[in-house]
Image: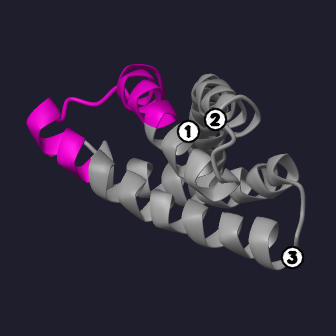
Amino acid sequence: MNEQAPRAEHALIRLARQFSRFFSVGLVAVAVHYGVMILLVEVFRLDEVHAAVIGYTVGGFASYSLNRKFTYDTERSHAAAAWRFAVVAGIGLIITWAFMALFARYFGWHYVLSQLITTAIVMMWSFFAHKYWTFVDPN
């Protein structure tokens, strides 16, 4: 029997569990992000793209601490992980700005729908960037 098949299956199961934890943490970060965004748009009448960027930033703080502990359980120091997280989040912020501008301003879609689609795009970017760069153990 091929020993590679059970290893590949085990690795796939581990990846699925890790993504599930990432998704759960993401729900918390998204709740913070969307809460701030909707508050800024609906109460303070801030532009939806600016509100999305601010919400993304606030949600990012929750995301870092929860992902560090529960998703990736890394041995990498805060000093080494935090700046990497900031780089990945910064790229995610640019992706958020670009897709929100495209969907909400150019296409004229509702800002919440625009943000839902943008969130899915940024989620995939963030998961793999954090898995293979930010929180990978230095050993």
Q: Is residue 131 left or right of residue 87?
A: right
According to the image, label 1 marks what residue?
Answer: 55
The label nearer to you, 2 versus 1, is 2
Question: Which residue: 57% across, 64% down?
Answer: 97
Question: Which residue: 16% across, 31% down?
Answer: 78
Question: Which residue: 18% across, 35% down?
Answer: 76
SS at badge 1: helix
Amino acid type at image mark 3: Phe
Q: Where, by quadrant of the figure, is residue 24 drawn?
A: top right
The picture places residue 55, in percent across and down from the top left corner, at 55, 38
The picture places residue 107, in percent across and down from the top left corner, at 87, 76
Q: Main secondary structure of the magenta part?
A: helix
User: Looking at the image, which is closer to me, 70 or 33?
Assistant: 33
Please provide the residue range marked out in magenta. Answer: 58-84
According to the image, label 3 marks what residue?
Answer: 107
Disc 1 and disc 3: Cα gap in Å? 21 Å
Relative vertical location of residue 138 with respect to residue 23 in this rendering, above or below: below
Q: Is residue 59 left or right of residue 35?
A: left
User: Looking at the image, which is closer to me, 26 or 110?
Assistant: 110
The quarter of the picture where the N terminus appears is: bottom right
Marker disc for residue 126: none
